[in-house]
Image: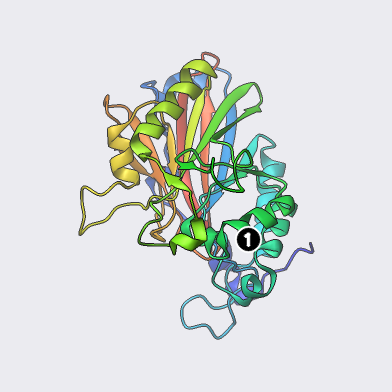
Amino acid sequence: MEDLKLKSKNMKRRNFIQQSSAAAAFLTLGGLSLESFAKKTTKHITILHTNDVHSHIEPFPADHYRNPNMGGVARRATLVENIRKENPNTLLLDAGDIFQGTPFFNFYGGELEFKLMSMLKYDAATIGNHDFDNGIGGLYAQLPNAKFDIISANYDFKNTVLNTHIKPYKVFIKDGIKIGVFGLGVELKGLVDPRMFKETEYLNPVEIAQDMSRILKEDEKCDLVICLSHLGYYYKSEPTKICDLNLASQTKNIDLIIGGHTHTFLPKPTISKNSVGENVLVNQVGCYGLNVGRIDFYFDSDKNLASKGKSIIV
């Protein structure tokens, strides 16, 4: 995939990094002062993430009213490649709704999306409601094109063709740091035609998240636990509805929730409190591949943790 050089007048905008205090300052998750990090040898893990790309493979047209000449897989590939050169200890994740939204999906049924994500060397993705738009059989048919893990813990596929093909979580090791990633999906009833997801059973995401985070933290001994969520960031008209912010407050042992579904753009991660008063980062970067989220985690020699985050416009 060739590097697309950015044209002069749009260069600043496309390379513009949405900066805030979180981009320059650390968010301490483990209760450790930043001064102590400076005194100890640190390990650096970078998490890059997308959500709700919706089959947007090419940049928006130059005359688009809102996103002229922005986005596109080629630019994302260049950005990811450069960050991996900067820090080889990088994971690239997606929070679902990979499919549906352009003629590419209508013609190829998701083949192109999965093949391009594989070329970008995505590490894992979860499943969004629109990923069922060609039916569960259509999703199953495209799995051979995904050279990355598709994970979902609260969709029970045991009575479907996806049984055994979708794992609840994945553990990665980068520079000796164990990173556990699990996936959660939104309730499909009312969003997706039942004929599309067939006998897929939706399980309570809070209960499943508690199980997954316990397994990853206590059994798998993970240093960092990440939830790939397609639950949605927050529903103002339904404040008690399960969403990323409510998930964070009702669970523990999750360090980062990477969200999707509501197309929420956050220039920096939200710092929420979990059920035992510890910090949880919650992030989401809009939609259509216009942005890539970046969270940098730093571990000292005792594996204490700090982080900083930002969103990058593609």
| Point 47% across, 16% down: residue | 218
- Counting from the top left corner in percent of width and height, residue 300 is at 53, 19
- Counting from the top left corner in percent of width and height, residue 10 is at 58, 73
Q: Is residue 227 above or below residue 95?
A: above
Q: Is 2 on the left or on the right of 156, as rendered?
A: right
For the C terminus, the quadrant is bottom right
Outermost residue to the top: 302
Q: Is residue 142 above or below residue 228?
A: below
Indicate the secondary structure of the residue bearing disc 1.
helix
Amino acid type at image mark 1 = Gly
| Point 51% across, 61% down: residue | 196
Outermost residue to the right: 2
- Counting from the top left corner in percent of width and height, residue 138 is at 63, 60
For the N terminus, the quadrant is bottom right
Outermost residue to the bottom: 63
- Counting from the top left corner in percent of width and height, residue 19 is at 44, 53
Q: Is 42 on the left or on the right of 36, as rendered?
A: right
Circle 1 crowding by C-alpha within 10 Å: few under 14, some 14–19, many from 20: some
**Residue 156 appearing in the image:** yes
Q: Is 203 on the left or on the right of 222, as rendered?
A: left
Q: Is residue 11 above or below residue 230?
A: below
Q: Nearer the viewer, residue 30 or 258?
A: 258
**Residue 78 appearing in the image:** no
Q: Nearer the viewer, residue 141 or 244?
A: 141
The residue under label 1 is 138
Res 207 → quadrant: top left
Q: Nearer the viewer, residue 134 or 54?
A: 134
| Point 27% across, 28% down: residue | 275
Q: Nearer the viewer, residue 140 or 232?
A: 140
